Image (tube, rainbow, N blue to C red):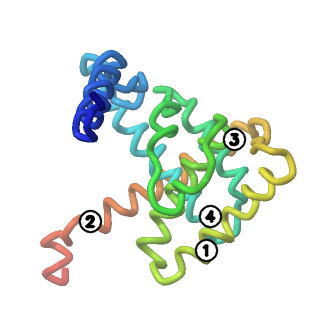
Amino acid sequence: MRPTPRQLLTLALAAFVVYALARGPAPQPDACAGPANGEGTADWYRMSLLRCTAKDLIARDVVAGRMSLLAAAALFRELNELPPRLNCEVPMRYLCYGLTSQMPGHTPDERLCRQVLLRVEDFLNEERPGCVEHAFAAVTAEYRDALRRQGRVCLPPPRDPGAVDAWLRRAREATRRASREALPPSSDSASGD
């Protein structure tokens, strides 16, 4: 007796469930989740905020043409290495959406480029929604060229440590500026004194 399509589908689904249960949950990166046992929570939060702000500023420079994609990815690598170390290797294999999902992410350097491209794409969607595809194509030209020439993307070696410190200073300034702008005016300034 031949199995019916419904029986085959049921068998395939059952096999998938067994596979998924045996495999377990996807591995979680050790440092992406936050500080362990609440230790150093304030420092972890402050550094995470600075790192995210610095990455956003770098992505804006990439869009503006002031920095190449590969140089930005190399800076992301250095920012990820700052304590507390940020290991997003696992999620970057799976986490991509929109135009970034079309970019290869086979090597660690390619995944760092994808980290930059996700931020670039988010910035473009927020600030320049009418020209996302055109601007994204311009940013990824260097990436595609490296793949064509070498078969993979190779990031430049680590830069001067002062460069990362400079980006963190810019991030601190941007965070302070945003905090001041978010605060309502004080009652003294509202009265005209």
**Mark 4 vs mark 3, CA separation in Å:** 18 Å
Name the one closer to the observer, 86 or 168. Answer: 86
Q: Of tags 2 and 4, which is closer to the observer?
A: 4
Residue sitting at x 61%, y 74%: 135
Looking at the rendered structure, the number of numbered marks drawn on it comes to 4
**Mark 1 vs mark 2, CA separation in Å:** 30 Å
Q: Which residue type does callout 2 highlight?
A: Ala
> Which of the two labelled residues, at mark 1 and mark 2, occupies the earlier sequence position?
1
**Mark 4 vs mark 1, CA separation in Å:** 13 Å
Q: Secondary structure at mark 3?
A: helix
**Mark 3 vs mark 1, CA separation in Å:** 30 Å
Residue that carries the numbered disc 2 in the rendered image: 182
Name the one closer to the observer, 13 or 121. Answer: 13
Identify the image quadrant of the N terminus.
top left
Badge 1 vs badge 2, beta-carbon distance below 8 Å: no
Few, some or many residues within 10 Å of mark 1 (<14, 14–19, 20+): some
Badge 3 vs badge 2, beta-carbon distance below 8 Å: no
Residue that carries the numbered disc 4 in the rendered image: 61
Q: Quadrant of residue 190?
A: bottom left
Name the one closer to the observer, 123 or 95. Answer: 95
Work out whether 140 lies above or below 191. above
